[in-house]
Amino acid sequence: MKKSRADIRSGVKSRIRKKVQGTTERPRLAVFRSLNHIYAQVIDDEQGKTLAAASTTEKDLGIKSGGNVEAAQTIGKTIAERAQAAGVSQVVFDRGGYVYHGRVKALLDASREAGLNKNEAKAQENTESNENE
């Protein structure tokens, strides 16, 4: 029997979740991507609480279409601001079984630029500049 894409993603997601745990000091930034929207949550797995959330379905963000890279960048900035307001500066990223590409990558890069995982963003810039030389 052939597996569907959803079944394959479910298996990948479960393998990722075995390794990625959000703690009180460093919660998990989980991403869910649908065809028309993208959602992000900062989750403390030890307490089982969502500390911050953002999605393209929110009316006050003024996003017309959630299925594009620009919307993902907006959500990345928004989740970073909300996480910092909740006292979170470091997160561990959970891509949720999606390939680190396109909208998922845009969301994480925007959250780094907005201030989440500052050390990680600097390290990434240094490696990119070394590759260009």
Image (cartoon, grey):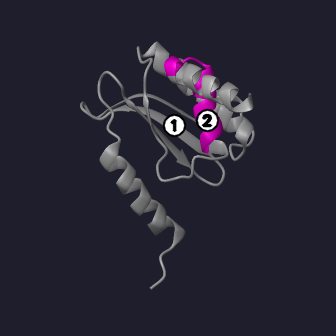
Residue 29 shown left or right of residue 18 in the figure: right
Q: Residue at x 52, y 24 (%)?
A: 120
Residue 92 shown left or right of residue 128 in the figure: left
Question: Disc 2, disc 1: CB below 8 Å?
Answer: yes
For the residue marked with disc 2, what is the amino acid? Leu
* 110 part of magenta stretch: yes
In this rendering, the count of numbered labels is 2
Q: Residues within 10 Å of mark 1 (few under 14, many from 20)?
A: many
Q: Which residue is mark 2?
A: 107
- The answer to whether 130 is drawn above or below residue 89 in the figure is below
Cα distance between the residues tagged 2 and 1: 9 Å
Residue 77 showing in the rendered view: no
* 1 part of magenta stretch: no
Q: Which residues are magenta?
A: 104-119
Quarter of the rendering containing residue 115: top right
Q: Which residue is mark 1?
A: 40
| Residue 107 pos. (x, y %) | 61, 35
For the residue marked with disc 1, what is the amino acid? Ala
